[in-house]
């Protein structure tokens, strides 16, 4: 067929389907984005302009040079002195935030997993007890728990003479709360060597047992034998290097508590509350993940005669764990952010330090901007770590 | 990977997934039940004894505190402060009226929903299900009545129960236009409550306190943050890069920062962000912070809902020639929102609990009241903080536990995750 018309069919088609600009998707997309950008930009510009004119009116500096001035207050429980700079104070705060968060995450995971598994126990009392705990704690605001733990429990502990003691582990009294903790009299170097030697021995044993198992099918016992190898190698290094790791045990000694690692009352109250509260959330996550493992998995494991412990350890928990990682990561983030509630009981973490710096003359806006940036950094690092774990697990699985 | 607590526990733990709660439990005779549930193996028996004695000990200590050693006089004398803070004592009929309006609205809503859901269940099952869901609330009401020991509150409770039942019956009968009008009326209830409390000679919200303030902050926060959260969720799923990047930045920024820091910042610095002379009061600042913060979480919830809508729905709508706006408004969003309702209720619960954080800026909510009243002249130095804090915990616990039970029911009713 020949075309006699001056316009080619392709041309004609393009013109027929090309809508007017106000209905053309390609045009609209660009216009829409420009409009969004303009609106958001206008709002931000308005806010910033208000800030600038407001600050100029009050004669407040907009820079960050205040960070070099001296802080003007001391931080109890650390060797921070009033003469040090404000930036140093913020570092101390970040250190305290991390100190309570890391310990909290570890302990909350242990308690939470135990509670979550207990909620599914065949034992009626264990099941009910765990449920009572979870339903009670989960529905009370954390701030009340923290204030209660601090003012009603920790500050009202008995004097050192009648201290609550778990001999060799823990002493609780109003003169200090201490737990048994390793000490490093010669610094971290030799201790690190001991740990490294032990780990290498354990890794080598595990590798050897795994290879043997793969080749012959003889039970590998790599965990048990690895532990033995660790003990032997680390013990040898420990003796060879002249006992570089000691242990300090707390003791209630008349009117004082001696030895052990001391925890300030604020730290102790905050840690306990964070752990109790977060564990109740973790327990729910663990329970939900275990329940979402298809029932057939457990039944099949039963059919191949695994014991209840083996079914839990090798079949149910590994699958549940995969489901639980993202919400668990969320709880870890929450715990870290919730440590900021310590402002109410004067534990000197980031938020409390920032508040005190502002009270001592730091400009509020810059201080909060810095605080937000630091928290974002911490949150994003935790998110990145857990994402890594998550990705590894998913890859291994599928 | 797994933590060390697990293997030691495993001895007495049934590894299998929990008994399915929807399946009726087998009714065993008592002796067999005890054997199956408490003493199946020797380890099980040890657990039973240990856990049983722990539970008995703590239960005894708790009950002894509540019923014997605690002196509730301080709570009794300050009950009004706990409920409404320093609200003008000559205007107390206003909170009562607001509660009655709320009760009427709740009854109407329940009736309307039941009407929509179709033929209702047997009366006995309804009563049992309502009792199972609202017993904490009933416990709170009983505790309050026991503490007040006067006739007025009792009368109010009776009237409110009558209102709930009456409006529920009314809501069930409404059809067609009447039903629409009913839903509109329910939506207007919060507005009516605020008007009764604050307008025509009432107390403006700067003077509110106690539980009233907590509930108000939570309700204001969730209703204001919802539109913003919706826009952010749509923005995050949009195929316009600018909208997506801005939404993601907003959401991640506010989800990465603790609420306390934001509240402190809002109260201390929000004045800088608005023109001078317009600086809002503390309550407005706090509401603004709650809105900004919660909208990031709501956005993520709605995004989850959006993702749960099957792709075929959009494709079918496209095939019918609907415009993108209409697809979003009439096809995707209704399904997405329905799927997000339980999670939204969960968010509301945590917002309600988070309202206690305004403690740090000194607003007179429940926790602040509990913290301050032991310093009253009559109670100073008696160490009654335990009683007041326990009462505050109880109030919050009742609120969030009731709501969480309700959201579990919604989840089952909507069949989220079953399609």
Image (cartoon, coloured by chain):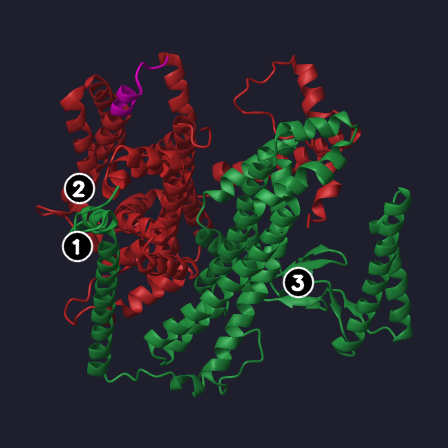
In the picture, measured across the screen, residue B398 lies left or right of residue A391, that is left
- Please tell me if label 2 and label 1 are on a single chain: no
Task: Please report, as a chain letter, where disc 2 is located.
Answer: B
Do the numbered discs 3 and 2 sit on residues whose CB atoms are within 8 Å? no
User: Quadrant location of residue A363?
Assistant: bottom left
Which residue position holds label 1? Answer: A21
Magenta range is B111-121
Q: Which chain is red?
A: B
Q: Nearer the viewer, mark 1 or mark 3?
A: 1
In the picture as drawn, the residue positioned furthest to the left comes out as B200
Where residue A78 appears, as percent x and y from the top left, is 57, 76
Mark 1 belongs to chain? A
How many residues crowd around disc 2 within 10 Å: few (fewer than 14), some, or many (20 or more)? few
**Label 1's element?**
helix
- Name the residue at 54% across, 55% down: A332
Direction from residue A334 to residue B329 in the image, left or right: left
Taking the spot 35% from the left edge, 81% from the top edge, the residue there is A361
Q: Residues within 10 Å of mark 3 (few under 14, many from 20)?
A: many
Q: Earlier in the sequence, mark 1 or mark 3?
A: 1
For the residues labelled 1 and 3, say whether their Cβ atoms are less than 8 Å apart: no
Secondary structure state at the residue bearing disc 3: helix
State the CA–CA distance, disc 2 to disc 1: 44 Å
**Chain holding disc 3:** A
Q: Is residue A68 left or right of residue B314?
A: right
Can residue B179 be seen? yes
> Height in image: A236 above or below A19?
below
User: Which quadrant of the figure contains the C terminus of chain B?
Assistant: top left
Residue under label 3, please give it: A160
Chain A rendered in what hue? green
Q: Is residue B201 above or below residue B326?
A: below
Q: Which residue position holds label 2?
A: B191
Q: Please tell me which residue is depicted at 30% across the width and 84% down the height of the picture.
A: A61
């Amino acid at each position: 067929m020949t075309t006699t018309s001056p316009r080619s069919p392709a041309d004609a088609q393009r013109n027929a389907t090309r809508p007017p600009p106000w209905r053309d998707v390609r045009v609209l997309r660009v216009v829409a984005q420009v409009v969004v950008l303009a609106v958001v930009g206008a709002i931000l510009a308005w806010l910033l302009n208000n800030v600038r004119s407001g600050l100029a009116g009050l004669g407040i500096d907009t820079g960050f040079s205040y960070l070099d001035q001296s802080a003007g207050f001391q931080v109890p429980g650390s060797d921070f002195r009033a003469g040090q700079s404000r930036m140093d104070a913020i570092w101390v705060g970040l250190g305290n935030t991390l100190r309570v968060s890391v310990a909290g995450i570890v302990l909350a995971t242990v308690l939470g997993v135990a509670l979550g598994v207990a909620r599914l126990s065949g034992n009626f009392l264990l099941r009910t007890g765990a449920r009572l705990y979870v339903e009670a704690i989960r529905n009370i605001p954390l701030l009340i728990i923290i204030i209660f733990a601090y003012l009603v429990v920790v500050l009202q502990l008995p004097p050192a003479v009648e201290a609550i003691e778990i001999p060799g582990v823990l002493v609780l009294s109003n003169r200090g709360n201490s737990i048994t903790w390793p000490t490093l009299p010669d610094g971290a170097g030799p201790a690190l060597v001991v740990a490294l030697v032990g780990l290498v021995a354990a890794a080598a044993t595990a590798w050897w047992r795994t290879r043997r198992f793969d080749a012959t099918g003889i039970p590998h016992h790599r965990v048990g034998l690895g532990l033995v190898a660790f003990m032997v190698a680390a013990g040898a290094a420990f003796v060879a290097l002249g006992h570089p790791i000691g242990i300090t045990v707390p003791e209630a000694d008349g009117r004082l508590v001696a030895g052990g690692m001391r925890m300030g009352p604020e730290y102790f109250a905050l840690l306990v509350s964070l752990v109790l509260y977060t564990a109740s959330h973790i327990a729910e996550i663990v329970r939900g993940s275990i329940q979402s493992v298809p029932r057939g998995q457990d039944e099949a494991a039963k059919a191949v005669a695994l014991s209840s412990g083996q079914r839990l350890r090798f079949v149910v928990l590994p699958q549940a764990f995969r489901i639980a990682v993202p919400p668990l990561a969320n709880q870890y983030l929450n715990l870290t952010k919730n440590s900021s509630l310590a402002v109410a009981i004067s534990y000197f973490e980031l938020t409390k330090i920032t508040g005190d710096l502002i009270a001592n003359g730091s400009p509020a806006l810059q201080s909060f901007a810095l605080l937000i940036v630091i928290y974002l950094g911490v949150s994003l690092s935790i998110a990145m770590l857990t994402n890594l774990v998550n990705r590894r697990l998913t890859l291994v699985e599928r | 990977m797994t933590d060390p607590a697990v293997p030691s526990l495993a001895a007495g733990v049934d590894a299998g997934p929990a008994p399915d709660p929807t399946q009726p439990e087998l009714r065993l005779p008592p002796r067999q039940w005890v054997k199956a549930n408490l003493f199946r193996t020797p380890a099980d028996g040890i657990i039973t004894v240990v856990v049983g004695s722990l539970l008995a000990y703590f239960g005894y200590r708790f009950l002894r505190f509540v019923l014997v050693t605690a002196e509730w006089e301080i709570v009794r004398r300050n009950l009004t402060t706990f409920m409404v803070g320093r609200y003008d004592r000559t205007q107390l009929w206003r909170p009562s009226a607001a509660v009655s309006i709320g009760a009427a609205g709740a009854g109407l809503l329940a009736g309307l929903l039941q009407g929509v859901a179709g033929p209702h269940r047997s009366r006995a099952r309804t009563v049992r299900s309502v009792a199972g869901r609202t017993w904490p609330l009933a416990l709170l009401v009983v505790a309050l009545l026991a503490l007040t020991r006067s006739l007025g509150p009792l009368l109010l409770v009776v009237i409110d129960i009558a209102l709930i039942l009456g409006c529920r019956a009314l809501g069930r009968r409404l059809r067609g236009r009447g039903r629409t009008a009913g839903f509109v009326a329910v939506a207007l209830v919060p507005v009516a409550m605020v008007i009764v409390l604050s307008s025509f000679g009432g107390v403006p919200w700067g003077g509110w306190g106690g539980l009233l303030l907590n509930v108000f902050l939570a309700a204001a926060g969730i209703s204001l943050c919802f539109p913003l959260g919706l826009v952010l969720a749509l923005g995050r799923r949009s195929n316009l890069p600018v909208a997506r990047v801005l939404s993601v930045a907003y959401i991640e920024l506010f989800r990465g920062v603790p609420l306390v820091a934001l509240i402190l910042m809002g109260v201390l610095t929000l004045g800088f962000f608005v023109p001078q002379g317009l600086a809002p009061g503390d309550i407005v600042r706090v509401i603004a912070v709650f809105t900004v913060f919660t909208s990031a979480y709501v956005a993520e919830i709605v995004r989850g809902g959006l993702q749960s809508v099957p792709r075929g729905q959009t494709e079918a709508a496209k095939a019918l020639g609907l415009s993108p706006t209409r697809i979003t408004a009439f096809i995707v969003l209704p399904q997405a929102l329905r799927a997000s309702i339980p999670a939204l209720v969960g968010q509301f619960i945590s917002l309600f609990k988070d309202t206690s954080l305004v403690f740090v800026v000194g607003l007179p909510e429940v926790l602040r009241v509990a913290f301050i009243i032991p310093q009253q002249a009559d109670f100073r130095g008696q160490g009654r903080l335990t009683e007041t804090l326990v009462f505050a915990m109880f109030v919050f616990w009742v609120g969030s536990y009731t709501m969480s039970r309700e959201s579990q029911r919604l989840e089952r009713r909507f069949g989220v995750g079953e399609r």
